[in-house]
């Protein structure tokens, strides 16, 4: 939180919001500590995939590979009212951050407008940027708890190769418009064997900073098929990434840098299944994380608090899987056979 406040100091409106939000975070932290005293752990983060629909077909997309994102019209997905109920519950529990994802989350304007009313919670919106229009700029200007995080893969050639022709130019145009309005935004980078040096270079990150970007989320590519395995960073490339992010934090503190799963490893292992965050899919299923699409509870039928107590989550937190060493970007995906065995076991009881 301190780093985020520093990153917005030159923006009076955003820094004023961040000071108020810091007070909310303190109150939320107190709720979580009180729950801990009664033996109940509440994470500070929730990931909400609010739609299964997306207008792009990014190369190697994990969500499409797992059929969490499809081209068909969504069926039996949570309504805006049901999502608002989840946001209210999260606020009551002391959850301070809800990442809005998809599919492409900005397709669901109704949900994002509902999120804007929950000022005690910060909503980073991981978006491909193609749905941002005048009304969205106005909403972001009004509701400073909504923070667009634009997905970019490096330069024009790298971004368009993965996301589609013309996407890079649309992202840059939106970044410049966000800067003109003094709206804080971030960038999300999927780190692969092809772009790991480009996306950690001073030139690339300076280009983002100059356009007003306040933070970068580096996500190691998770191979969902054998064909895409070649894109997953090797041990040497992950070591390079870790060293570069450490350097950036020391030399370029004008932006916040988050690394997944690098920061998890420093905290002692995977923080999914409620250790540090959990995932609600577009149909309401409570899952350990987006890369581990297994669920034994649905929030349509129960509360968030009960979902956190689910047999699957409880078994994962009390076992060794989350703490295991692993090669790729997600231990639960890499050890999915064990997770499948575990959910069969808990469901058979």
Image (tube, rainbow, N blue to C red):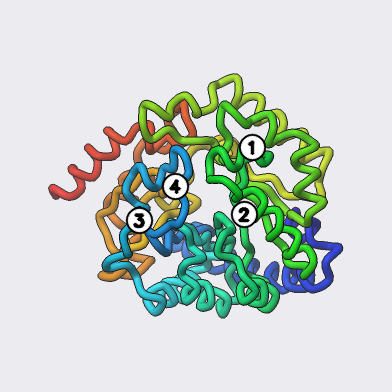
Determine which residue is flagged by label 3. 71
Label 1: state its secondary structure. helix
**Residue 189 at x, y = what percent?**
61, 43
Residue 59 or 303: which is nearer the viewer? 59
Which residue of the protein is positioned furthest toward the front in this rendering? 165
Question: Is tag 3's residue or tag 1's residue first in the polypeptide sequence?
Answer: 3
Would you place residue 281 above or below residue 341 in this image? below
- Residue 39 visible at all: no
Determine which residue is flagged by label 2. 150
Determine which residue is flagged by label 4. 57
Q: Residue at x 45, y 27 (%)?
A: 326
Q: Gap between marks 2 and 4, in whole Å? A: 16 Å
308 left or right of 347?
right
Q: Which mark is residue 157?
A: 1
- Graded by Cα atoms within 10 Å as few (under 14), some (14 to 19) or many (20 or more), the crowding at tag 2 reads many
**Residue 191 at x, y = what percent?**
58, 35
């Amino acid at each position: 939180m301190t780093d985020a406040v520093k990153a917005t100091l030159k923006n009076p409106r955003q820094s004023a919001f961040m000071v108020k939000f810091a007070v909310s975070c303190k109150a939320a932290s107190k709720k979580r500590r009180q729950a801990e005293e009664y033996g109940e752990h509440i994470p500070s983060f929730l990931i909400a995939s609010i739609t299964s629909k997306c207008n792009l077909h990014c190369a190697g997309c994990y969500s499409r590979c797992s059929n969490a994102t499809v081209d068909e019209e969504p069926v039996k997905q949570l309504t805006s009212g049901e999502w608002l109920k989840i946001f209210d519950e999260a606020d009551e529990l002391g959850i301070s951050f809800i990442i809005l994802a998809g599919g492409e989350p900005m397709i669901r304007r109704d949900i994002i407008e509902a999120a804007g009313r929950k000022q005690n919670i910060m909503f980073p919106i991981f978006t491909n940027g193609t749905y941002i229009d005048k009304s969205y700029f106005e909403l972001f200007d009004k509701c400073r708890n909504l923070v667009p995080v634009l997905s970019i893969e490096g330069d024009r050639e790298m971004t368009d190769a993965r996301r589609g022709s013309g996407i890079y130019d649309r992202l840059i145009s939106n970044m410049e418009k966000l800067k003109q309005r003094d709206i804080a935004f971030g960038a999300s980078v999927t780190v692969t064997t092809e772009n790991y040096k480009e996306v950690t270079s001073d030139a690339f990150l300076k280009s983002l900073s100059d356009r007003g970007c306040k933070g970068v989320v580096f996500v190691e590519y998770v191979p969902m098929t054998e064909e895409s395995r070649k894109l997953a960073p090797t041990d040497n490339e992950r070591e390079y990434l870790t060293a570069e992010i450490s350097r950036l934090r020391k030399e370029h503190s004008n932006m916040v840098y988050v690394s997944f799963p690098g920061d998890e490893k420093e905290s002692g292992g995977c923080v999914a299944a409620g250790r540090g965050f959990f995932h609600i899919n577009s149909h309401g299923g409570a899952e350990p994380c987006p890369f581990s699409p297994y669920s034994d509870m649905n929030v349509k039928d129960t509360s968030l608090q009960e979902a956190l107590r689910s047999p699957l989550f409880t078994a994962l937190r009390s076992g060794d899987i989350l703490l295991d060493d692993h090669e790729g970007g997600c231990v639960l995906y890499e050890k999915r056979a064990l997770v499948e065995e575990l959910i069969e076991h808990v469901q058979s009881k």
